[in-house]
Amino acid sequence: MKNLTTIIILLLIMIACTPAETNEASEPTAPQPVEFGDSKYIDLAKQGMPAMMNQDLDAFVANIAEDGLYIFSAGDTLAGKAAIRNYWAGRMEAIDQIKIENDVWLAVKVNESENAATGNWVMGWFDVNATYTTGKSMSQNVHTLYHYNDADQVDVVVQYIDRLPIVQAQSTE
């Protein structure tokens, strides 16, 4: 997974660093369909990590829009800030400690897309290590996408996780 992440990041950097053709007439150019985004969105996304590790759910959801969506890779979706907070409150009851490390972030601005929302996105890759109340531990690499609305609040989170290690760590068998 880390090699795939590294390859994707390198490809994005190579594409972004490819020199554009110059036009002697200095005509205004249309924005690219996708370009590097403002790093302030990375800073906003990173604010949730210490809050999650401290199990401070109010701080974790502080920058989520009231009508925000939290979509998991298995297809489950949480709708609304209160539902997102309540879900994580229930999850935290089963977790003694959670550690997030080795994080990599990329902000992109989507100007045109047929498949994704336009606007500001942040992609985050990080290792999650959790110890559960069962005494078992779980480790995996998580990929999370954050979309920001015009008020710079997260209105969509898409999280790619593997549920199997979580289920196994929660099992009392």
Image (spheres, helix red, strand yellow):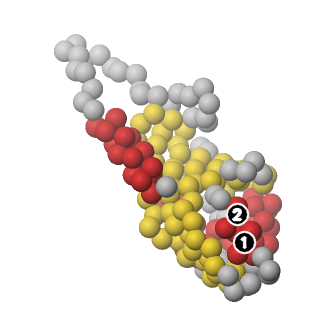
Image vertical order of residue 33 relative to residue 158, above or below = above
- Locate residue 171, reporting x and y percent: 78, 76
* Residue drawn where x is 41% and y is 27% of the image: 31
Q: Is mark 1 on a helix, strand or loop?
A: helix
* Residue drawn where x is 59% and y is 47% of the image: 147
Horizontal arrangement in the rendering, residue 131 relative to residue 111 (left or right): right
**Mark 2 touching mark 1, by CB under 8 A?**
yes
- Locate residue 151, reporting x and y percent: 60, 48
Q: Name the residue under label 1.
A: 168
Q: What element carries label 2?
A: helix
Whether residue 151 can be seen here: no
Horizontal arrangement in the rendering, residue 89 relative to residue 96 (left or right): right
* Residue drawn where x is 72% and y is 72% of the image: 168
Quadrant location of the C terminus in the rendered image: bottom right
Horizontal arrangement in the rendering, residue 7 relative to residue 72 (left or right): left
- Dot 1, how many residues are within 10 Å of its Cα: few (below 14), some (14-19), or many (20+)? some
The residue nearer to you, when weighing 29 against 105, is 105
Q: Name the residue under label 2.
A: 164
